Image: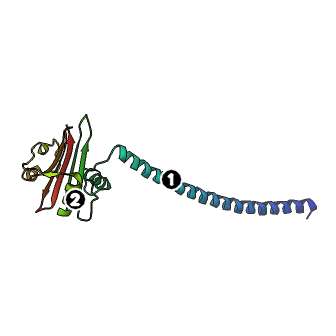
């Protein structure tokens, strides 16, 4: 074999070996980059989730969310506390809520099941008084929901509170079924 040929063969073998080493290094770099990218993506998703949670809480303070079509959502439990000033305990179930803030007046409606002790807490906290008459105005709510039982409410004397600024609150409670309905509105 000539010397030139030997040099060519050795150069070729060294090139192949160098390429294999470069290929291995490239593969390891690609794995490292892929791992780093996956970690970065996971961190971004976590940051997005935290931002959504913070934004949602701030937005809920500005524009409260009501879930009139589904009971016991986090929004409905929050509205229960916001409007009744009592945290819903284990006895409170089937909470539905609705809020209408369009126009110059507003209306909020809640329906739920609870023990008498929760109703007593609400009445005390909200300074409601038992009415001597059935209140018809709130029965004509203008909204139709399966959970707003106008017929049953029409037979119950409510607890109520009114102020001179035309702000009204009513709470009806059916002791037999443990169902309650609450409305607050302005005129």
User: For mark 1, does the 10 Å Cα neighbourhood hold few (<14), some (14 to 19), or many (20 or more) residues?
Assistant: few
Comparing 107 with 167, the one in front is 167
Residue 157 in view in this figure: yes
Residue 42 in percent (x, y) is at 53, 57
**Gap in Å between the C-alphas at discs 2 and 1?**
40 Å
Residue 89 in percent (x, y) is at 27, 63
Please tell me whether mark 2 or mark 1 is closer to you in this view: 2
Q: Residue furthest top?
A: 104
Comparing 1 with 112, the one in front is 112
* Image quarter of the N terminus: bottom right
Residue 185 in percent (x, y) is at 21, 42
Determine the residue positioned at 54% across, 56% down: 43
**From the viewer's perspective, is 56 left or right of 153?**
right
Q: Which residue is mark 1?
A: 47
In the drawing, what numbered circle is on residue 121? Answer: 2
Callout 2: SS: helix
Determine the residue positioned at 46% across, 53% down: 49
**From the viewer's perspective, is 87 left or right of 19?**
left
Determine the residue positioned at 27% across, 59% down: 88
**From the viewer's perspective, is 2 left or right of 162?**
right
Callout 1: SS: helix
In the drawing, what numbered circle is on residue 24? Answer: none
Q: Is residue 175 above or below residue 105?
A: below
Q: Earlier in the sequence, mark 2 or mark 1?
A: 1
Residue 113 in view in this figure: no
């Amino acid at each position: 074999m000539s010397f030139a040929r030997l040099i060519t063969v050795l150069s070729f073998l060294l090139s192949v070996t160098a390429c294999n080493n470069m290929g291995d290094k490239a593969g390891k770099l690609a794995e490292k980059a892929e791992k780093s990218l996956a970690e970065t993506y996971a961190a971004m998703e976590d940051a997005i989730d935290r931002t959504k949670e913070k934004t949602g809480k701030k937005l809920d303070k500005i524009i409260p969310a009501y879930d009139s079509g589904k009971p016991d959502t986090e929004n409905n439990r929050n509205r229960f506390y916001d409007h009744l000033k009592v945290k819903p305990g284990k006895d409170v179930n089937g909470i539905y809520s609705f809020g209408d803030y369009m126009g110059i007046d507003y209306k909020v409606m809640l329906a739920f099941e609870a023990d008498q002790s929760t109703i007593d807490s609400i009445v005390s906290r909200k300074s409601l008084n038992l009415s001597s008459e059935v209140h018809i105005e709130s029965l004509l709510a203008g909204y139709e929901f399966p959970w707003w039982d106008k017929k049953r409410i029409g037979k119950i004397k409510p607890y109520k509170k009114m102020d001179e600024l035309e702000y009204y609150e009513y709470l009806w409670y059916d002791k037999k079924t443990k169902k309650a309905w609450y409305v607050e509105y302005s005129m």
